Structure formats: structure tokens, C-alpha cells
Image: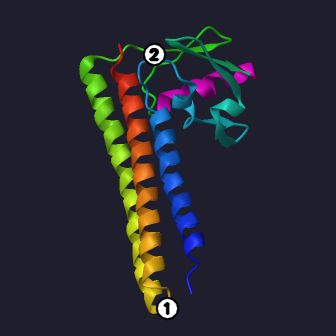
Amino acid sequence: MIDVKQTLNGAEERMEMAAMFLEDSLNRIRAGRANVAILDGVRVSSYGSMVPLNQVANVSCPDARTIAIKPWDRKAIRDIEKAIMDSDVGITPENNGEIIRLGIPQPTEERRKELVKQCNKIGEKAKVEVRNVRSEIKEKLKKAIKDGLSEDNEKDAEADLQKLHDKFIKKLDELLAAKQKEIMTV
């Protein structure tokens, strides 16, 4: 027989993963303010292997419009610049021989609207995942009735599942609203 509590905990865990995916994805979107998270996806060739940028350099934001990258090994500057140029960051790096600087341009109104659309697409993917988890668990509960789960327990579990679903959809909407506000703020 199905363990209702364990099934609901598994569903909550998967919904939480969808929320974490959305949060992580939104952090990588450049919103006009310097944020080191936009460089999380950058991989640098170092001693024959591809490693994350933060493992070969110190990455910081000295002000709201600049990201500074100070390599631990000066010889790595060329590799870091090449990795940034090859990535989808979309910013040209400038270096003075010691530090690489990325100037974050102020996005235009049109660009901001594109970024909001991009955020909404990612948000919709996360919401679809939450809805898929809900429908999958509902199916499990329906099948569990045949295996001996009482209908009352099934109805209670379904109500709890709906509460979980609503909680995570609300959380995803709040994450999206916060990111949209950040993007649209000049």
C-alpha cells in the first residue's frame, strides 16, 4: 500500500526543485545591475580542463555597473577573456594586465521587455513542472484506492497536494514578480 505522507513529501521535494531551478535561472539573467551570478555558467580552460570561472579567479562587484575579475594566475587572463567572449554573457571584457573588468550597460526599454519575456518563459517551465508533479501524484493516489487506500484518505491527500501546488505556484509568481521589478527599474 502507498505511504501517503512519503508520497506528498516526495512531491514537495520535486516542487521545491522546480522553484530552485527558477531562482537559479533568474539569477543568471542580466538585469542592468552588476551581479556575479551571470558568470556562473562561464567555464575557463585551465591546465587542460574546463573549470568554473570562480575557481581560477576572484569575482567581485566593486560598484553597481562593474564586475571585476582578478585571476590568481596572470597567465590565465587570456583564457578567462576568451571564455567570457565565447559564453552567452554578451559583454566584452576589458583588462589592464591584472584585472578584467566587465562594464554592465544600462538596458534599453525594448531590451528590458525582452528580458521580462525571457523570465516569463523560464517561469512557465517551472510552473509546468509543478503542475506535472501534481497530476502525477494525483494519478498515484487514484491507483492507490485500488490497492486498498480509503477514499477519505485519498481525498485528504489530494487536498494537501493542492495546497502544496498552490503554495509553490505562489512562490514562483513572487520570484518572477521580484525579478520583473528588478529588470524594469531604471
What mark, if any, has residue 162 been given in the picture? none
Q: Is residue 129 left or right of residue 83?
A: left
Principal secondary structure, stretch drawn in magenta = helix
Q: Where is the N terminus found, in terms of image quarters?
A: bottom right
Indicate the secondary structure of the residue bearing disc 1.
Answer: loop
Image position, residue 169 (x, y; %): 39, 49
> Which region of the structure is painted magenta?
72-86
Q: On the picture, is 75 further left or further right than 177? A: right
The answer to whether residue 87 is seen in the rendering is no
* x and y percentages locating residue 71 in the rendered image: 70, 21
Q: In this view, which residue lies farthest toward the front?
A: 152
Q: For the C terminus, which image quadrant?
A: top left
- The one nearer the camera, 91 or 2, is 2
- Residue occupying image coordinates x 26% and y 27%: 113
Residue 7, position in %: x, y? 55, 71
Please tell me whether residue 169 belongs to the stretch shown in magenta: no
User: Which sits earlier in the primary sequence, circle 1 or circle 2?
Assistant: 2
Disc 1 marks which amino acid? Asp
- Neighbour class for label 1 at 10 Å: few (<14), some, many (≥20)? few
Above or below 158: residue 46 = above
The residue under label 2 is 104
Looking at the image, is 49 positioned above or below residue 27? Answer: below
Label 1, on which residue? 147
